[in-house]
């Protein structure tokens, strides 16, 4: 996105760490595919919750880095994955997890990291005078806007699952 060597190096380093931790998350644990699905679901629901709550309730702007982000959207980014995963874990026949305070804490952390990743990518896009990173998904700013939170959430979740078991 930028011609500055430091930004390119930093971006490449972050991507390598993210891809490596995603690979390790999927393959190092017996139920790695469930972990991968859980983190992906949290990140997607974080984006969807932020968008829906932000559009419905609007309110004061969160930051100048990404002017469409609001405090109500941030609240929705925490609520949507928490509620959806609570319903899924408590009312499905899955045998991997039950909704506990540890899972709730994990959801909040991954949602927070996903939102920070979104803001960080928005910051670098602004610094590079880029509005959208592609047009594959019309009206959504490109594929990067769909995965920017995941780029940062996968390494954190890998560390989480490595050093703290549920």
Image (cartoon, rainbow, N blue to C red):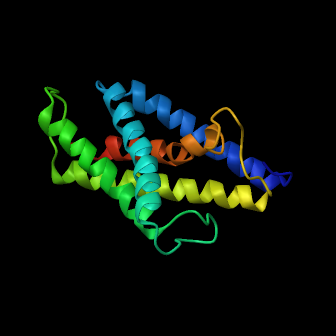
Q: Residue 91: where, in percent of width, then height? A: 13, 35
Where's the C terminus, which quadrant? Answer: top left
Camera-nearest residue between 125 and 106: 125
Q: Is residue 87 left or right of residue 69?
A: left
Q: Residue at x 70, y 57 (%)?
A: 124
Camera-nearest residue between 136 and 5: 136
| Residue 26 in sight | yes
> Outermost residue, bottom direction?
60
Q: How many marks?
A: 0
| Residue 165 in sight | no
Q: Residue at x 86, y 51 (%)?
A: 3
Camera-nearest residue between 53 and 101: 53
Q: Residue at x 55, y 41 (%)?
A: 146
Q: Is residue 123 above or below residue 84?
A: below
Q: Please tell me in which quadrant of the rendered image residue 13 appears.
A: top right
> Outermost residue, front direction?
56
Q: Is residue 30 left or right of residue 4?
A: left
Q: Please tell me in which quadrant of the rendered image residue 129 appears.
A: bottom right
Q: Residue 74: where, in percent of width, then height? A: 42, 63
Q: Is residue 4 above or below residue 159?
A: below
Q: Residue 69: where, in percent of width, then height? A: 53, 63
Q: Residue at x 73, y 60 (%)?
A: 126
Q: Residue 17: where, in percent of width, then height? A: 57, 41
Camera-nearest residue between 118 and 155: 118
């Amino acid at each position: 996105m930028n011609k500055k060597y430091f930004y390119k190096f930093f971006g490449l380093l972050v991507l390598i760490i993210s891809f490596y931790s995603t690979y390790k998350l999927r393959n190092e644990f017996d139920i790695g595919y469930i972990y991968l699905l859980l983190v992906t679901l949290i990140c997607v629901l974080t984006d969807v919750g932020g968008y829906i709550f932000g559009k419905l309730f609007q309110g004061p702007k969160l930051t100048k880095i990404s002017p469409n982000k609001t405090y109500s959207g941030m609240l929705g980014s925490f609520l949507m994955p928490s509620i959806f995963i609570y319903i899924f874990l408590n009312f499905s026949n899955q045998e991997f997890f039950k909704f506990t305070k540890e899972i709730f804490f994990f959801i909040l952390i991954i949602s927070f990291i996903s939102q920070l990743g979104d803001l960080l990518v928005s910051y670098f896009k602004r610094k590079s005078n880029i509005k959208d990173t592609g047009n594959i998904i019309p009206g959504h700013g490109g594929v990067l806007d769909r995965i920017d939170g995941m780029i940062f959430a996968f390494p954190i979740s890998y560390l989480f699952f490595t050093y703290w078991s549920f």
